[in-house]
Amino acid sequence: PPPDIEPLSPDLRGLQTLKQQLASHRNQQACNSCHQKIDPLGFALESFDPIGRWRDHYPKVDKRARRGSPIDTSAVLPGGRKVKDLLELKAVLLQREPQVARCLTVKMLSYATGRLLEASDRVAVNQIVAKLKKDGNRLRDLIHLVVQSDIFLSR
C-alpha cells in the first residue's frame, strides 16, 4: 500500500497482555475513536473466558509456567471514572439504569428487526422501557417484550 495508509493491524510482537495489544491498536488514529469507548467495558468483563466461565488468569502461553498471567480488570471509562473490576462497573451502570435500559432496548430492537430504529418507533420504545422498569429491568423481560412488540411482529 502507499506509505500514507496505515496497516489494519499494528505489530503486536513482544506485547504480553491484551491491554498492551489494545493500547497499541488504539494508537492508530482510525481505530482510537471506537476503541477508547469499548475497550474499558471489555477490560472489566475480561475475567470471563470466551464461553462465560470465570477465570483469574489467562491461559498459559509458556508450557513451563505454572499458570498464565493474571487478568487486570481495571479500566478508565470514557468519562474518566476509574473502575477496578466488574463489581465497580456494575455500580456505575446501576447509577445510570434508565439510560442503560433504554440503550439496551433500542439496540435489541434494532438487532431483532435487522434495521435502525426511526423516530416513529419512539412510542414503542418508550412503552417497552416503561414496562421493563415496572417489572424490575430484567433482561429476560426485555427479550419477551421485544419479541412481542409490534415493531418486531410487523417487520
Image (spheres, grey):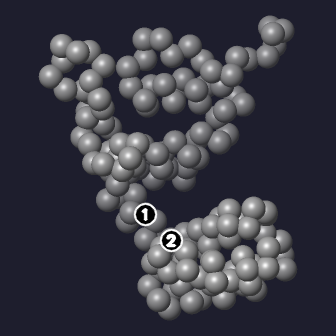
Q: Is residue 92 above or below residue 27?
A: below
Q: What residue type is disc 1 on?
A: Val
Q: Nearer the viewer, residue 51 or 65?
A: 51
Q: Mark 1 points at which residue?
A: 92
Q: In this view, does 2 lie above or below 71?
A: above
Mark 2, secondary structure of its residue: loop
CB atoms of marks 2 and 1 within 8 Å? yes
Q: On the rendered structure, is 58 left or right of 110?
A: left
Image quadrant containing the C terminus: bottom right
Q: Is residue 153 above or below residue 103?
A: below
Q: In this view, does 144 lie above or below 7?
A: below
Residue name at image x 26 percent, y 43 percent:
55
Mark 1, secondary structure of its residue: helix
Does residue 74 show up? no
Q: Mark 2 points at which residue?
A: 96
Can you tell which quarter of the image residue 130 is in? bottom right
Image quadrant containing the N terminus: top right
Q: Position of residue 14 (x, y in %)?
A: 43, 11
